[in-house]
Image (cartoon, rainbow, N blue to C red):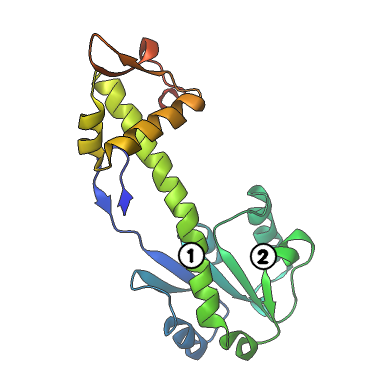
Amino acid sequence: MTINPMTGEELRRIEYVATLGLSSAECAQVERVLPTKDCQLLPIENRTELYVYPCIAIIIRGGALDAEQLNELEDYFREYDYVVAETVVWIGEPKPSGKLGRIVKSYDSFEALLGGLKYLLLSAHKTAKGLHDFSSKIALAIRMLKLIEQRPGITSDKLAEELEISRRSVQRYIETMRMAGEWVEYDASLRGWKLVSNQSLLLDDF
């Protein structure tokens, strides 16, 4: 479940499998093996769309990119030190070189990819889900800090109720935040949690 860290509202997360340079028939074959009902096929013509949608996988036909576009793609992955949520699948020539060449999954043809495509997309979904779950925990921690900031003296039971988690999970989150340098302490007079001097390393950045 994806939660808006400021409002606590549940958000539906749509994931995409992007394709660049594939035929309509090939796109239809990809669409048939999408891993979940919330996953959608995204055939793109404008390469900048690769960078604005939450894709779990990107399937690129090498011949669809010229040298300048290939360099732009390389720059995008270099900015993230080649560690991204997307699984990048490369079909045909020219193949990327250097670090980008090492992180992509290369196939000589679409037919060579097709046999293992369903498993590959399932694996891509699991990888992206793991990263997304980590992000969701950070979002929940931000929301917890915000509640403590806004309501000094809020109890663990009230935090658990507001965040829809267990009381034990509240304790774990608070301990983790303390270890990360957040100034969260229990105030005996208020019988609840507060931020020391109303300061937060994380919230002060917002």
Which numbered disc, 1 or 2, marks the residue closer to the eye?
1
Q: Position of residue 88 (x, y in %)?
A: 61, 68
Q: Position of residue 33 (x, y in %)?
A: 44, 82
Counting the numbered discs, the total is 2
Q: Quadrant of the N terminus?
A: bottom left
Q: Tell me the SS state at disc 1.
A: helix
Residue 58 or residue 162, whichever sits in front: 162
- Compared with 166, 17 (above or below) is below
Q: Quadrant of the C terminus?
A: top left
Q: Residue furthest front?
A: 168
Q: Position of residue 145 (x, y in %)?
A: 35, 28
Residue 130 or residue 110, whichever sits in front: 130
Name the residue: 26% across, 39% down. 163
Q: Label 1 to label 2, Cα distance in Å? A: 29 Å
**Amino acid of disc 2:** Gln
User: Would residue 39 appear left or right of 62 to someone viewing this image?
Assistant: left
- Compared with 58, 167 (above or below) is above
Which residue carries the number 1 mark?
126
User: Would residue 142 appear left or right of 100 to someone viewing this image?
Assistant: left
- Compared with 129, 44 (above or below) is below
Query: Quarter-wise, where is residue 41 in the image?
Result: bottom left
Q: Tell me the SS state at disc 2.
A: helix
Instruction: Mark 1: give few (<14), some (14-19) or many (20+) Cα within 10 Å.
Output: some
Which residue carries the number 2 mark?
69
Residue 47 or residue 17, whichever sits in front: 17
**Amino acid of disc 1:** Lys
